[in-house]
Amino acid sequence: MRVVTERIPTLKSVTVGVWVNTGSRDEQPAQAGYAHFIEHMLFKGTRTRSSAEISREIDALGGEMNAFTSRETTTYYVKVLDQQLPHALELLSDLFHHSRFAPRDIEKEKQVVLEEIRMVQDDPEDLVQELHMGQVLRRHPLGRPILGREQTIRGLRRQDLLDYRETYYQPSQTVLSIAGNFQQDELEGLAAKYFGKGRATPATQANGRRPPDVHGGVVLRKKKFEQVHLCLGLKGVPAGDQDRYALYALNSVLGGSVSSRLFQEVREKRGLVYSIYSYLAGYSDGGMITIYAATRPSEVDRVVDLVCREIRRIGSKGIGGKELARAKTQMKGSLMLSLESSHSRMSKLAKDELVYGKHMSLNDMLASIDRVSEAQIRHVGRQLFTLDSLAITGLGPLAPRTLQSYK
């Protein structure tokens, strides 16, 4: 297991994270939801602790313990005061190595996860983005819901989960990331004690991943909401791509802030939406640009036309020097502010190791932002901001001929 650390002596906290390089994209169709379900089960009791004892223990430390599953990683973390680091490492190690996966707990947790799936179905902003991923990526594993599907959750068995964990929870695919206030010598000993006993196995998981293709088209789904919720998608770049900082700048100008073109034009100037924004998703071998908006049914075509106009404008003309300078300043400020906690530093360390295989310093990242040129911006805009493969997903009380010109 790789261990990455950053000592920050000015803090009184320390955050420990265990990152496993497996997520929903590594599942077979019949395994949809396994990675996320395993994340739940690690908190349901170990050989020496019950689920209630785990909760009481972390509360007694005054700390925070949680986990999350993405399309490419599964993360378990604990944040505590610096003097509680040994206890936190021991507790996290116990969950990670010795969870029982008791059959009774599995059956109970199935109902919890099914409620989580229903919660997404009742949240139109979440649901339209989930539908959009499935539309744009089609049958590619990245397009599947992270939570899985009702039939696969109901049908999973204890041995299925244990087999999945045995396959993907390999030391070679796991990173232990620690950031905050600690003594390096003490930390090395604790890390070896609690996480240094896994048997080495060959890395097999990355070999099964294949790059995604981004598909265009229009998918409309009627549902009884007050608004129509929209996602528009374009092809992006992988997480480690050399053009990522240029794309960050373009996204900032398009819809990444309240001063962005879309927010100012569609909300502030015309009052057509309350919420409109764009964001980037970068994976190890592909990426997406997504614009989200919600509006009344009669204004769907108008909102989509305005969004497409800004996409075409960036694709043909790029952005001005003043816009680029403002985007760079915003990016640098957001980056520095985002790294002010031990949790965010822990996350950055782990992502750097998994994506780049090395640590990217803050100065390196700031310098990369500064190096973005207007010529690079124009190149990236021409490559990606095109409507040739535009994907549109609509969810809500759609009028009969909505988006007819885009079909």
Image (tube, rainbow, N blue to C red):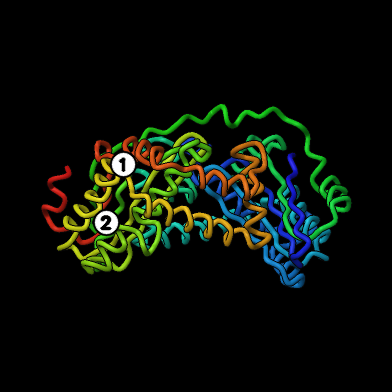
Left-right relation of 35 to 382 = right
Counting from the top left corner in percent of width and height, residue 145 is at 44, 47
- Quick one: 220 or 288, which is closer to the camera? 288
Residue that appears at 45% across and 46% down: 281
Which quadrant of the figure has residue 182? bottom right
Amino acid under disc 1: Phe
Pointer 1 residue: 385
* Neighbour tally class for label 1: few under 14, some 14-19, many 20 plus, Cα within 10 Å: many
Residue that appears at 48% across and 57% down: 329
Which quadrant of the figure has residue 43? bottom right
Left-right relation of 16 to 377 = right
Amino acid under disc 2: Leu
* Cβ–Cβ under 8 Å for marks 2 and 1: no
Counting from the top left corner in percent of width and height, residue 357 is at 65, 36
| Mark number displayed over residue 198 | none
**What's the distance in space between the residues labelled 2 and 1, CA to CA?**
24 Å
